[in-house]
């Protein structure tokens, strides 16, 4: 299988480290082997030079030219429906689930425990029916 | 009266007829009002960390003047009576129960003072042989007060779905829990 997730102009990336971590942005220009210029007007990421070690490439791209303005980027994102496509990926879903779990209060954790017990009780009952 | 001469330093022009000692400044330590953590308000669910009821989740009723917190299980749900508890041995959760309808005005630190307890007369023989734990003597006044407070408290607890089960359950840490990362 050939390699397809290139670090190219228009590639959507997830920022992993720094004040903007957790947000997605687009590669707008490549500076050199280690750094690129990213911008994310829709997601709140300032236009900045960032090393590749701080970002993770995703499978999504948008059609823009090198050094596109924020206005063009916004239009390209809207056309490609990037935000909804990103939220639909299992990657984004896992990230949001982790966030939700970390923000649970003690009462929420109790409710989760009860729900898990109910679910496994339903499954156990069904298994009994099937194995009988 | 002739003013004293200024030869021997300063002599005051006026002095009282009798020697009256001025009162010394009091060195009594002034106690400030007890500080209660911002996260603890009437109705907060607390997790007790130490003492007989460690691990129990309990409803905070009000802070007392001594800085201790007045707390009740409710007794029917988890066996914790109306009791005083120290803030230092408690985790305040973000869960709250509406306790506006619960009347706790009669409870203060004097209510819980040991001097009010019935004196248990213990003879010499009993002192040496009596090691089995005796059932605590709970006064009728306490039982009546518990019933009165819990009547309205249970209604407030029943208003929140799953709260009864939550208060009945005990808190504990299991293998993958990281308490410094958990939000309460």
Image: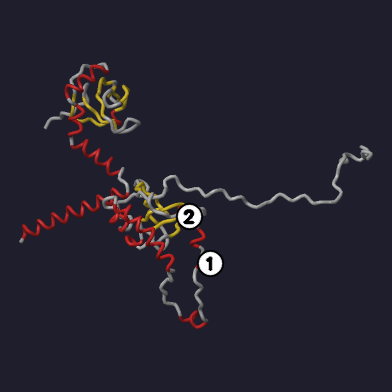
Q: Which quadrant is home to the N terminus of chain B?
A: top right
Question: B9 or A53: nearer the eye?
Answer: B9
Mark 1 or mark 2, which is nearer to you?
A: 1
Residue B96 is left or right of residue B36, and the answer is left
Q: Secondary structure at mark 1?
A: helix
Q: How is the image coloured?
A: secondary structure
Please state the horizontal and vertical placement of residue B102, each as a whole percent of the image. Answer: 39, 53
Question: B22 or B28: nearer the eye?
Answer: B22
Is B16 above or below relative to A61?
A: below
Q: Secondary structure at mark 2?
A: loop
Instruction: Residue B8: give its label.
Output: none
Please state the horizontal and vertical placement of residue B111, each as a whole percent of the image. Answer: 49, 61
Residue at x 44% of width, y 69% of height: B139
Question: B27 or B103: nearer the eye?
Answer: B103
Instruction: Residue B68: give its label.
Output: 2
Q: Crowdedness of circle 1 by 10 Å Cα count: few (<14), some, many (20+)?
A: few
Please state the horizontal and vertical placement of residue B79, each as a whole percent of the image. Answer: 35, 63
Residue at x 31% of width, y 26% of height: A50
Q: Which residue is mark 1?
A: B115
**Chain holding disc 1:** B
Q: Crowdedness of circle 2 by 10 Å Cα count: few (<14), some, many (20+)?
A: many
Residue at x 48% of width, y 62% of height: B112
Query: Mark 1 vs mark 2: same chain?
Result: yes
Residue at x 28% of width, y 40% of height: A99
Mark closest to the chain's N terminus, 1 or 2: 2
Is A60 above or below relative to B23?
A: above
């Amino acid at each position: 299988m050939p390699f397809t997730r290139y670090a190219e102009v228009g590639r959507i990336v997830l920022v992993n480290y720094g004040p903007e971590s957790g947000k997605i942005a687009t590669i707008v220009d490549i500076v050199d082997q280690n750094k690129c210029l990213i911008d994310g007007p829709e997601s709140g990421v300032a236009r900045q030079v960032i090393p590749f070690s701080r970002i993770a490439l995703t499978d999504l791209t948008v059609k823009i030219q090198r050094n596109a303005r924020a206005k063009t980027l916004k239009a390209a994102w809207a056309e490609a429906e990037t935000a909804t496509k990103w939220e639909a990926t299992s990657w984004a879903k896992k990230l949001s689930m982790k966030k939700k779990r970390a923000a649970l209060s003690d009462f929420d954790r109790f409710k989760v425990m009860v729900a898990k017990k109910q679910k496994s009780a339903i499954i156990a009952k069904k298994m009994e029916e099937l194995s009988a | 009266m002739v003013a004293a001469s200024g030869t021997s330093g300063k002599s005051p022009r006026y002095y009282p007829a009798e020697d009256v000692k001025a009162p010394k400044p009091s060195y009594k330590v002034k106690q400030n009002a007890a500080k209660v953590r911002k996260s603890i308000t009437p109705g907060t669910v607390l997790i007790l960390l130490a003492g007989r009821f460690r691990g129990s989740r309990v409803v905070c009723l009000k802070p007392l003047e001594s800085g201790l917190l007045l707390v009740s299980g409710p007794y029917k749900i988890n066996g914790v009576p109306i009791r005083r508890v120290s803030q230092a041995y408690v985790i305040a959760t973000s869960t709250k129960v509406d306790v506006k309808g619960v009347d706790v005005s009669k409870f203060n630190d004097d209510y819980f003072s040991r001097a009010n307890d019935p004196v248990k007369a213990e003879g010499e023989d009993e002192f040496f042989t009596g090691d089995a734990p005796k059932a605590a003597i709970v006064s009728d006044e306490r039982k009546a007060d518990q019933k009165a407070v819990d009547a309205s408290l249970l209604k407030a607890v029943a208003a929140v779905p799953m709260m009864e089960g939550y208060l009945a359950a005990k808190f504990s840490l299991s293998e993958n829990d990281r308490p410094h990362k958990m939000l309460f």
